[in-house]
Image (cartoon, helix red, strand yellow):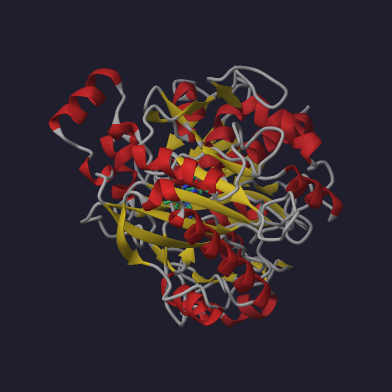
Amino acid sequence: MRRYDYVIVGAGSAGCVLAARLSADPNVKVALLEAGDEDSVNEIRVPAAALQLTKTKYDWDFYSEAEPGLGGRSVPLARGKGIGGTSSINAMVYIRGNPADFDNWERDGASGWSYREMLPYFIKGESNERGEGRFHGRSGPMSVQDARYVHPLSKRFIEAAKQAGHPYNEDFNGATQIGVGHFQLTQRNGERCSAADAYLHPARQRSNLDVITGALVLKVLLNGTRATALSIFRCGQEETLQVEREVILSAGTYGSPQLLMLSGMGPAAQLKSFNIATAVDMPVGEDLQDHVLAPVTYRTSEPSLLRAGTAADLELYTKERKGPLSSNGIGAGAFLSTVPGETIPDIELYMAPLLIDDLYSPPREDGFGIAASLLKISSRGTVTLRSARPDAKPRILTNVLTTPEDQRTMANGVRAAMHIARQNKLAEVRVSDASVPKSEREADIDDYLRNRAMTDRHPAGTCGMGRVVDSELRVLGIDGLRVVDASVIPTIPRGNLNAVVLAIAEKAADMILHNAT
Ligand SMILES: Cc1cc2nc3c(=O)[nH]c(=O)nc-3n(C[C@H](O)[C@H](O)[C@H](O)COP(=O)(O)OP(=O)(O)OC[C@H]3O[C@@H](n4cnc5c(N)ncnc54)[C@H](O)[C@@H]3O)c2cc1C
């Protein structure tokens, strides 16, 4: 039987950070277990190919239950599967959220997680090509760069947003989040920089780190109230790995609660209905939160990113890693508040110089889309078991857009997107509406949202701090077991999640190493 000091479940954003940081001590033996495969295909490297990764073997391809707030539709919920996890298939936008988010975590009991305490971990993890400063680091593993290609339609969006009254913001991760600007990206010289590229690959040659792919973790094995081993399924057979110090679940917002429940930690009534003995009765899987996404799209007279991929583009990318193929498809965006005078945003806008309606069908016409993403969420969803079989997909009910508050803010976000699209700089090239609400009346926007909205694929909160784990991310009532990934987030921050998960994992690594000394 193989024995390790630390076993990390899931080689995603958090798992890669932990594997690199913990195995830096040559005296400990670390295993990183990943259900998916290696991240060796070109589609992962080339930013413009990102959309082609969903619904492939690199995506768990989850679907929600019939959503009451989305007209009973079941919506796709992409999740990365393989080395790098979701950081290998995401859109590479580098956003940290708002300082108030972390201060609220601290206020609500997550001691040690205020913005003041998180900022050093954002800085530690980052190598920002703009250089060092009050908000940024230059010598961390994750490469953060400006886009090497900005599409003319994105430049028009920035001008149109300014015409609509949004201030230009040079750095969404700096002194203020509000305004319109260019996103910085997790890229290195025009290629995707996943958590695996930044953290794991440079550490893989270490003899004290075993990275085991194709390993589906089935459950955590407890001895009394202590996690001591893991049961895994690999190459057609079950195997047990013995763990001396800690098991760390980094299987993501859907995977980590599923594993806890399969291992007897979760709501007792639910576990009982699947004949799983309860070790700890706790609200695992509750409090699922996700941002809500809805685009408005228009046809244009100006060529869009749809044209990318010509022989010249390919040559430019191959030789210099520049041009349209280095684009992540959303170079520009904005943060705004729908509450007049408020300086903390409740809506993020993404500008896509591409006519994509649902993120899953390829574009066929020239156009652009402005998608509104609801940042402040009052609804709560759930992740529950579908079956006691570890290879069954969990039941995911996001419950997005089920509260009047969220519906109202989201409707105002869509109105803000439509308002920008009407400004001269975009009106000059706008030919016709592709997909927009019938009017800006509340009933028409609500109807549009019921039929078109989806989630922004930023799930969080199912093993939240204070409810399932303590402020050091230890599972309540169990020794030797932590959860470190987006699921521990108590309240979803105002922005894309990858940078936040990387910083959470950096901080967790410090906690684990400190505990061990
Ligand atoms: C299409 C898409 C675009 C996105 N774009 C952005 C963006 O532009 N910017 C941004 O900041 N965020 C973005 N996100 C979100 C962000 O990437 C994720 O929130 C973040 O990567 C989550 O990290 P994690 O460590 O919690 O989980 P993950 O990175 O999902 O890692 C979980 C890992 O655990 C593995 N696993 C799960 N269960 C098991 C098991 N039982 N056994 C073994 N292994 C298991 C999975 O295969 C996976 O590798 C996007 C997400 C998606 C889906």
Give the quadrant of residue 122: top right
Residue 41: horizontal and vertical position, in percent? 27, 37
Residue 103 against residue 468 in the figure, above or below: above
Residue at (61, 32) in percent of width and height: 171
Examine the image and state in which quarter residue 126 appears.
Answer: top right
The picture places residue 512, in percent across and down from the top left corner, at 72, 35
Pick the residue in front: 500 or 410: 410
* Residue 343 percent across, percent down from the top left: 74, 49
Establish if 265 lies above or below 350.
below
Residue at left offset 31%, top offset 23%: 321
Q: Can I make out residue 132 in this image?
A: yes
Q: Nearer the viewer, residue 101 or 487?
A: 101
Total tally of numbered discs in the picture: 0
In this rendering, the answer to whether 218 lies above or below 446 is above
Report the side of 277 relative to 158 (left or right). right
Residue 1 makes an appearance in the image:
no
Instruction: Report the quarter where the C terminus lies.
Output: top right
Name the residue: 62% across, 63% down.
289
Percent across and percent down for residue 406 are 63, 70
